[in-house]
Amino acid sequence: METKMIGNKIAEARKKLNISQAQLAESLFISAQAVGKWERGESMPDITTLNRLAVILGVDLNYFSENFQPVASEMATVESMVKQSDELLSGKQNLPDNAGKKLSWDMSRGNWVDADFSGLKNLHEKFSSSNMQRCKFIGSDLSGLLLKRNNVDSCDFSGSDISNSRIQGSNLGKNIFKECSLKETEFSGSNIDRCDFTDANFTGTEFSKNNIYGCDFTGANFTGVVVKSGGFSGVVIKSGGLEKNTIANAVWNHTSFIDIQIADIVFVGTLQDCYFENCAFTRVTFQNATLINTFFKNNKKLKRIWFIECKADRITYEFLKQGNADLTGITLITQ
């Protein structure tokens, strides 16, 4: 959105209501100078303030978008709008019944830099094809969100609800998802680079054809997760749960599994330069898997791992042997 365009629309709506910048500022509990900066295009109100502006100015939130086309039958007369505004400003009129409801707002194809959306609730709008840098969504309700062909860099989603969302064909880099709910969310065809998923909840989440690099999943809960192909490189999965998951044709490189319970899971794919330490295995199967230079240290119940039609290089084979694993079903790779 263009800052100048929004400023012009604020000024236009304010003048139609015949109210001053000072009166508008008073109703928003801000300074008249702040309103002046908006109207001159020197700054822009955040999304929460835009919601309040829409109510006070008697416009739909979409009025502030570039391609908004008003419907003639829905436009009130200037006199009626002035009266409503005066009553709102004087406190004589309550907010309309729909003031607390989610207004329709298309956030797609935008360029959002250093925006703060923290604490917003019921924010189900689509941000498709948007560029977001250093934005804050701390403690926000983003459930049901669609991110498609997005670039999201250095944003903070800590404590937010991103459940039942779809993240498709996007680039996510250096974002913070600490203590987020990502239940039943679909990640597909995306590049996820150096993101922090500490203590996040991935119950029922699906990963399909993603490339995941250098992410930290310490304390994260993976239950009922489905992984369909894709790659995991430099990932840390520590002190969480990895249970009842389906992993098919994934490639794991330089990935560490530390201090976690691994249960009711089938690994299908390739594990290279991976590390299992202080893990407990229960009903774990490696099937049609290839294990290369993969290290097992101080793990419990290696005997309970089943290997079916697997291949392993010499060093991995010896690690498993020293841990008293049942090597039946493993073919040694020879050079």
Image: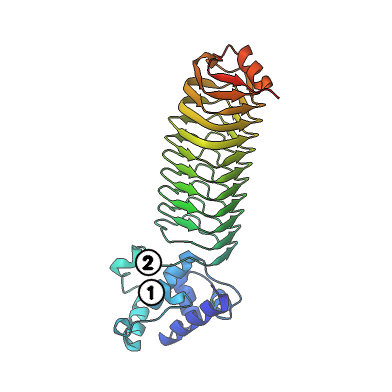
- Indicate the position of residue 265 as horizontal and vertical percent values: 46, 28
Residue drawn at (61%, 17%), measured in percent from left and top? 320
Please give the label number shown on residue 103: 2
Label 1 crowd bin: few (<14), some (14–19), many (20+), radius 10 Å: some
- The residue type indicated by label 1 comes to Asp
Determine the secondary structure under disc 1: loop
Label 2 crowd bin: few (<14), some (14–19), many (20+), radius 10 Å: some
Label 2 vs 1, first from the N-terminus: 1
Q: Quadrant of residue 233?
A: top right
Which residue is under mark 1? 60
Residue drawn at (48%, 24%), measured in percent from left and top? 285
Q: In which quarter of the image is residue 58?
A: bottom left
Which quarter of the rendered picture does the C terminus lie within?
top right
Does residue 17 lie above or below 264 as drawn? below
Determine the secondary structure under disc 2: loop
Q: Quadrant of residue 289?
A: top right
- Indicate the position of residue 218 as horizontal and vertical percent values: 57, 34
- Indicate the position of residue 237 as horizontal and vertical percent values: 57, 33
